[in-house]
Amino acid sequence: MRSLKGFKLLSPNLTVLLTTSRKPSRRTRSLAKVLARFMNWRYINRGKLSLNELFKLSSDEGLAIIEEVKGNPAILKIINPKDESILLKIRFNVSNVIKVKMDDSSVVFIGKVPFDPVLLGAIPQSKAGLKLARKVDFKKKVFVRRSDEFYIFEFYYEDLMVFKMKVKRDGIKYGS
């Protein structure tokens, strides 16, 4: 397998700005920082920023917001800041997050993904993307497994699992 040292497959138009709800728990902040680093997104502290201010900040990018349920990270929303529509909403549970130093290499999803990985800025699941994933040894991999009720996303950097995300099959919604 070949390695793509320093080769960036994403165009600058596909960057995403990630933030959290207004007063996130420590666990939510930790997940947001690691997810942003893993997916090559830009993370900002939300603080007192309103949604309108976030839309202005991310006008050239996508916007992702992690929300909480009972103090735990639980919902990831991918929003188009141009028309403020929700492109993707994922309801999840997450395992413990391991902080790892990562480079800005591209992310590949391995397995049948229930949504288009390009929404998250990853290699597409097209014929060309799958062929590239077979030929190149990517450092950042997301393994997707399915059961009757759940999708399980395992985020690996090199050979280390950074975190695991468990999503109910009906926990993925498109559009507002």
Image (spheres, rainbow, N blue to C red):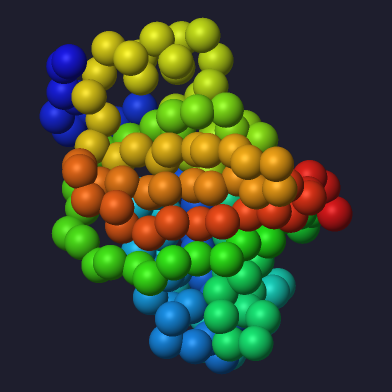
Q: Is residue 104 left or right of residue 149?
A: left
Let me know if residue 160 appears in the view: yes
Q: Position of residue 128 (x, y in %)?
A: 46, 9
Of the 4 image quadrants, the one containing the N terminus is top left
Q: Is residue 103 left or right of residue 96?
A: left
- Relative to 68, say whether 171 is above or below: above
Q: How many marks?
A: 0
- Relative to 113, say whether 74 is above or below: below
Q: Residue furthest front?
A: 148
Residue at 60% from the left image edge and 38% from the top image edge? 146
Q: Position of residue 79 (x, y in %)?
A: 68, 55
Residue at 66% from the left image edge and 35% from the top image edge? 114
Q: Position of residue 169 (x, y in %)?
A: 73, 47
- Dividing the picture into quadrants, the one containing residue 68 is bottom right
Q: Nearer the viewer, residue 60 or 73?
A: 73
- Dividing the picture into quadrants, the one containing residue 101 is bottom left
- Relative to 110, say whether 1 is above or below: above
Q: Is residue 20 left or right of residue 133?
A: right
Residue at 44% from the left image edge and 29% from the top image edge? 110
Let me know if residue 11 appears in the view: no
Of the 4 image quadrants, the one containing the C terminus is bottom right
Q: Nearer the viewer, residue 48 or 148?
A: 148
Residue at 25% from the left image edge and 67% from the top image edge? 99
Q: Residue furthest right?
A: 176
Q: Position of residue 98 (x, y in %)?
A: 28, 66
